[in-house]
Image (spheres, rainbow, N blue to C red):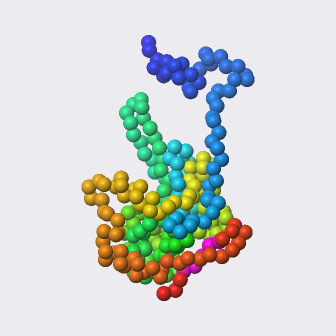
Amino acid sequence: MSLPLIERAENDGVRFVLSQQWQQSAQQPLYEIEPLAAVPRIPQRLPELGEQYRFHFDMTQCIGCKCCIVACNEQNGNPAEINWRRVGEIEGGWYPDTLRLYLSMGCNHCLEPSCLIGCPVEAYTKDTLTGIVQHSADTCIGCQYCTWNCSYGVPQYNPERGVVGKCDMCYGRLTEGREPACVNACPEGAIRIEVVKTEEWRREYSGSATHRGYLPPMTAFPQLASHFQTNSHRISERRTTGAYGPRLRIGRLSS
């Protein structure tokens, strides 16, 4: 009788251990994991002109533990049913070559944030120093227009508070030189903050987004571009000095 699993285990070496038939010495390890080189999880400098922060997610490292979700909720005081960061599963392939990956996603801090453009009370601001899209709960009226506008379902309405909330990349922690809660909680280092050149980022993805129904960049719509420029007073730039070097300061410009 053929036993494919045992044959596969024997052919693949020590990947599977199904019985005691394989004699292993006490000194011989069952398997070895090559340690990854240590990579800083947050940039060691502030973005320069034409740059901004963004999340870097390594899908090959994520194990789907959802520690990032728990850390985000604890940091921001959200109930379990409201998640500013979510983890989804992606499965593919055909047996025996199947694959399961996990995708952890928060706010993308878009170059042209639709939540900001669609907000009627200007509760959103995009910081020109960091590129982080921030939301003011004090200004928000809970209309939820931003939840409809965002293609990624990032803004979440909280019925108990009567306002919307979203990921702000733990702006306050970054100002102190600390990692965002999700970045700090990831046991595999799958989430990091990196500095990206905005024009390179735009070119990289606009070239691949050619599927039918794709909306071209805002520059193709002069009226929207004009609206975004008209509301530039909502974008604040703050520079102070601190132990981390030039620091950010939370706040918004008045109109």
Magenta span: chief secondary structure: loop
Q: In this view, does 188 lie to the left or right of 152?
A: right
In this view, the residue farthest toward the bottom is 255
Relative to 200, residue 218 above or below = below
Please state the horizontal and vertical placement of residue 156, each as a whole percent of the image: 46, 67
Quadrant of the frame with the N terminus: top left
User: Residue at the location (65% across, 16% down)?
Assistant: 23
How many numbered circles does the render carry? 0
Position of residue 136 relative to residue 217, above or below, is below
Residue at 69% x, 67% y: name it. 244
Identified at 52% across, 73% down, the residue is 127
95 displayed left or right of 215: right
- Residue 5 position in % (x across, y down): 48, 22
Magenta-colored stretch includes residue 231: no
Q: Position of residue 187 (x, y in %)?
A: 62, 48
At 40% from the left and 78% from the top, the residue drawn is 229
The image quarter in which residue 47 lies: bottom right
Tell which of 89 and 190 is nearer to you: 190
Q: Residue furthest left?
A: 212
Viewer-nearest residue: 153 or 38: 38
Q: Can residue 179 be seen in this view?
A: no
**Outermost residue to the front:** 49
Which contiguous range is marked in magenta? 247-252
Relative height, residue 173 to residue 236 (above, below)? above
Judging depth in this view, the residue of 197 and 68 nearest the camera is 197
> Vertical placement of 92 versus 219: above or below?
above
* Residue 171: image location, x then y, percent: 59, 68
Q: Can residue 116 be seen in this view?
A: yes
